[in-house]
Image: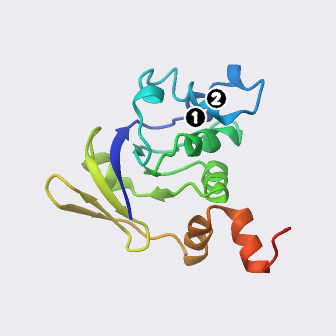
Amino acid sequence: MIKGRVWKYGDHINTDLIISGRYLDEYDMKSLSAHIFEDLDPIFAIGVKPGDIIVAGRNFGCGSSREQAPAVLKEKRIGAIIAASFARIFFRNAINIGLPVIVCPDAFCLLEKGNIITLDIRGGFILRESDGLRIGFNPLPEFLIDILERGGLVPYMKAKLGRCDA
């Protein structure tokens, strides 16, 4: 279960809005995280708290396939991203680093910025804490949940192979 406060954004949030290419001269996630969503929501980087949840419309993570976009969100300790749909490469990059991404079109219509929600990835539902509204979604396949629970693809494969050098 993941519990957090909602930050809400619209459709087609591209990777350049998540972290602008003008900051990608280095690969230090801590430094980059100070600029997350800078051109979209200047208060996000200073206002977001660990466990907060992003709710968005269609095609979240579109644009370039830069892996820094999900990585910088993970650096900020985002609890999950819930969107009506995701760009495929963003979706897999997020799963591969252990950042939960959930497809739920109804969430965008039913949740507002500031709502406190609980997300049950295995159970396939979101609970809006203020009134108990339960929003269902199709749970991720079990192997993707396993990857998330291990903290990403590399730790998952190390555990699966029984090796510490994989």
Q: Give the residue at x 43% y 67%.
A: 121
Disc number for residue 148: none
**Which type of secondary structure does the marked residue at label 2 adopt?**
helix
**Which type of secondary structure does the marked residue at label 1 adopt?**
loop
Above-or-below relation of 116 to 122: above
Query: Mark 2 touching mark 1, by CB under 8 A?
Result: no
Above-or-below relation of 48 to 115: above
Between marks 2 and 1 in the image, the one whose residue lies nearer the viewer: 2
Q: Residue at label 2?
A: 32
Q: Please name the amino acid that badge 1 sits on.
A: Asn
Above-or-below relation of 92 to 43: below
Residue 24 in the image, given as x and y percentages of width and height: 73, 26
Residue 113 in the image, given as x and y percentages of width and height: 29, 38
Indicate left or right for 33 with 24 as reference.
left
Residue 18 in the image, given as x and y percentages of width and height: 56, 32
Q: Give the residue at x 32% y 55%.
A: 106
Picture quarter with the C terminus: bottom right
Judging from the image, the colouring scheme is: rainbow
Indicate left or right for 97 with 113 as reference.
right
Categorize mark 2 by other alpha carbons within 10 Å: few (<14), some (14-19), many (20+). Answer: many
- The one nearer the camera, 3 or 135, is 3
Q: Please name the amino acid that badge 2 sits on.
A: Leu
Residue 160: image quadrant is bottom right
Q: Give the residue at x 65% y 61%.
A: 152
User: Which residue is situated farthest in the left direction here?
Assistant: 131
Picture quarter with the N terminus: bottom left
Q: Earlier in the sequence, mark 2 or mark 1?
A: 1
- The one nearer the camera, 132 or 104, is 132
Q: Give the residue at x 64% y 29%.
A: 32
Disc number for residue 14: 1
User: Which residue is situated farthest in the right direction here?
Assistant: 165
